[in-house]
Amino acid sequence: MKHTAATLLAQKQSGEKITMLTAYDYTTARIEDECGVNAILVGDSLGMVMLGYDTTLPVTMEDMLHHTKAVARGAEHAFVVADMPFLSYQTSVYDAVVNAGRLIKEGGAQAVKLEGGAAVCKQINAIVEASIPVVAHIGMTPQSVNVFGGFKVQGKSYERAVQLIEDAHRVQEAGACAVVLECVPAKLAEQITKELVIPTIGIGAGNACDGQVLVYQDMLGLTTGHTPKFAKKFADAGKLMREGFAVYIDETKSGVFPEQEHCFQIGEDVMERILNERGQQS
């Protein structure tokens, strides 16, 4: 079964939790898809975990298209959502629709995600009217890192909490099929989830959300340096990779690898003829 915006909504209605992970390449998308993840997010987080930037801000439409195409080829069942990068939708409603269309038409995504609440409702509505599903994203929106003064929890004050609830309703009214709640206090996220008809996908927003999303490098122990509080390490793939790389280097330098089983053979008569001919030439 191919997961869609409609199947995610059905999961909320039935109480079945939604699973979402990021992916940025064919191989990872294929593995996640085979494991049964409901949705794959091609996040602009690729700027940090794949391209080495400090923030998501330098990510371009061409970056997103390149990675979305690869993920879409690997995701047979998962609902593929592509992030709209910084300034691909904030500049105008027209730009928002055109760039969203590119991620669907060229990239092969089934939906796009954009950050912001009431301020981007015109864009959400226009994209939806162009027959493109939209996942909204409120709370800690990484593209606004310079406004927030860093990656900080949002909605802790009464005023900001009420604003987030209002933003959640506004994006729903604009036509969003789901909303990501990032770095939002758990009880506030629970209240938003209760009030909305559309699914909520939490990342650092508690377990009362309708689903969860994580950056796969975080949950597999592949990141270095600071790891977000909400990013539980489900496996230490980083340790396994380092061990594998170290053994490869040692065996290559010592001559152990490649062994006979990793080599292709040639007939002795063919090699003898070549050696005879080469010897005559010399």
Image: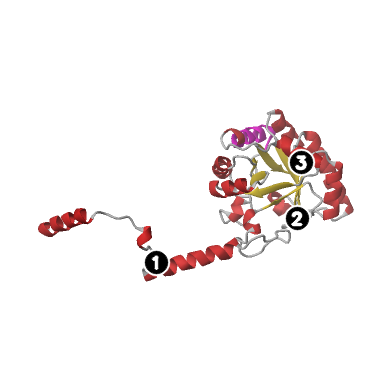
Q: Earlier in the sequence, mark 3 or mark 1?
A: 3
Report the residue marked by disc 2: 204
Question: In the image, what residue type sits under mark 2?
Answer: Gly
Question: In the image, what residue type sits under mark 3?
Answer: Gln
Q: Write down the region rendered in magenta.
A: 91-103
Dot 1 alpha-carbon crowd within 10 angstroms: few under 14, some 14 to 19, many 20 or more: few
The residue under the point 32% across, 55% down is: 264
CA distance for labels 3 and 1: 50 Å
CA distance for labels 3 and 2: 20 Å
Q: Earlier in the sequence, mark 1 or mark 2?
A: 2
Q: Is residue 93 magenta?
A: yes
Q: Secondary structure at mark 2?
A: loop
Res 131 → quadrant: top right
Res 66 → quadrant: top right
Q: Position of residue 87 (x, y in %)?
A: 65, 42
Report the residue marked by disc 3: 11
For this view, does 212 lie left or right of residue 165? left
Q: Secondary structure at mark 3?
A: helix
Q: Earlier in the sequence, mark 3 or mark 2?
A: 3
For discs 3 and 2, the disc positioned in front in the rendered view: 3
Q: Residue furthest left?
A: 280
Quarter containing the C terminus? bottom left
Report the residue marked by disc 1: 252
